[in-house]
Image: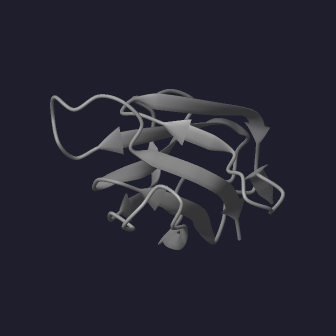
Amino acid sequence: MDLLDAGGGDGFAIGAGHGALLRYPHVSNLRGEVVARVAASAAGRVELRANSTSGMLLATCPVSPTGALAAFEDVRCPLAQGHGGAEVELVVAVLRDEDGQSGEFLRLDSLRLA
């Protein structure tokens, strides 16, 4: 299931700084893995949670710097088991590993549940 897709070309879907959130209501059958296509200027992570920013952690995708905000790589991470497959509001958070830094550090080109 494609949650976000820039549609190819030279663009990207979202540029994000620490704490940026995406929300997808009515997502069910969360199984398998998450594939995030990212470019990053600093280390961080993309977290997927159920229903809120403090809800059950469904996946954590560590992101390493890719060398430039135009150098995209696929990051794969497994979805946690045990959420029962119930419908959730999927909350996607972009978090930077270094405290005190602001501004865009990650670009997300696509986000897919595989």
Residue 110 picture location, percent across and down:
68, 57
Residue drawn 61% across and 67% down?
35
- Residue 88 seen by the camera: yes
Residue drawn 59% across and 70% down?
33
The coloring applied to the image is one colour
Q: Nearer the viewer, residue 19 or 40?
A: 40
- Above or below residue 39? Residue 17 is above
Residue drawn 58% across and 51% down?
108
Relative horizontal placement of residue 47, taking residue 83 as reference (left or right): left
Which quarter of the figure has residue 63?
bottom left
Relative horizontal placement of residue 18, taking residue 35 as reference (left or right): left
- Above or below residue 53? Residue 5 is below
Q: Which of 96 and 66 is in front in this view?
A: 66
- Residue 84 seen by the camera: no
Q: How many marks are shown on the rendered structure?
A: 0
Which quarter of the figure has residue 87?
top right
Relative horizontal placement of residue 15, taking residue 27 as reference (left or right): left
Location of the N terminus (image quadrant): bottom right
Location of the C terminus (image quadrant): bottom right
Residue 36 picture location, percent across and down:
58, 62
Residue drawn 66% across and 65% down?
31
Residue 101 picture location, percent across and down:
22, 32
Relative horizontal placement of residue 41, taking residue 52 as reference (left or right): left
Residue 13 picture location, percent across and down:
69, 45
Q: Which of 13 and 79 is in front in this view?
A: 13
